[in-house]
Image: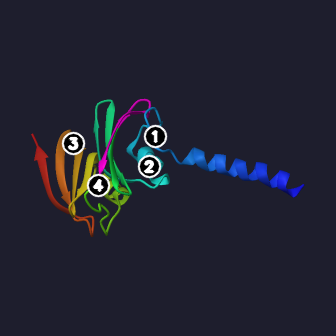
Amino acid sequence: MKRHVLLPAALSVLLAGAAFAVEPSLGANLGTSIEDISTALSADGYEMTKYEREGNRIEVYAVKGDARHELYVDATTGEVTKIETTARRGPSSLPGVSDDQIRASLGAFGYEVTGFERERGEIEVYAMKDGRRWELKIDPRTGGILRSEAED
């Protein structure tokens, strides 16, 4: 008798867990904000290394295992519209501050982050502030701004 009760309970736990982890595939809904997309990918073991929002499209680069994924997400529906996967050349994880910490820190200074890239020991952030587009170099260990340059 106990087996009959435990089996449905175990299945419901497994199905509930599947709702939180979204494997990126065409048509999958990852969310409409960078935070939603990052959370959805992280729940399935992906590390977001770069993103850029352009109009109604969010371009996201993420790594998992030996693969690098380039995802295009519709900013209004949150659905994945295109995926390109390539072999990964090396580790992208860097010690130091997290992407969320950098976004929060820059937000406190009035920046709205529109693009983000971690590559080869550097962090490059694109952001808007006071109607201007900025390119910022961030120290990966401390999160401090190393260089800021306004684009024309």
**Cα distance in 3D space between marks 4 and 2:** 17 Å
Kindly identify which numbered label has been placed on residue 100: none
Residue highlighted by disc 3: 130
N-term-proximal mark, 4 vs 1: 1
N-term-proximal mark, 3 vs 4: 4
N-term-proximal mark, 3 vs 1: 1
Q: Residues within 10 Å of mark 1 (few under 14, many from 20)?
A: many
Tell me the quarter of the picture where residue 139 sits. Answer: bottom left
Residue 44 x %, y %: 48, 52
Q: Amino acid at mark 2?
A: Leu
Q: Residues within 10 Å of mark 2 (few under 14, many from 20)?
A: many
Residue highlighted by disc 1: 30
Check contact, mark 2 vs mark 1: CB within 8 A: yes
Magenta-highlighted residues? 72-88
Residue that lies at the very extreme toward the left in this rendered image: 152
Check contact, mark 4 vs mark 1: CB within 8 A: no
N-term-proximal mark, 2 vs 1: 1
Relative vertical location of residue 54 with respect to residue 63 in this rendering, above or below: above
Q: Residue at x 87, y 57 (%)?
A: 2
Q: Amino acid at mark 3?
A: Asp
Residue highlighted by disc 2: 41
N-term-proximal mark, 4 vs 2: 2
**Cα distance in 3D space between marks 3 and 2:** 31 Å
Q: Residue at x 42, y 37 (%)?
A: 32
N-term-proximal mark, 3 vs 2: 2
Which mark lies nearer to you, 3 or 2? 2
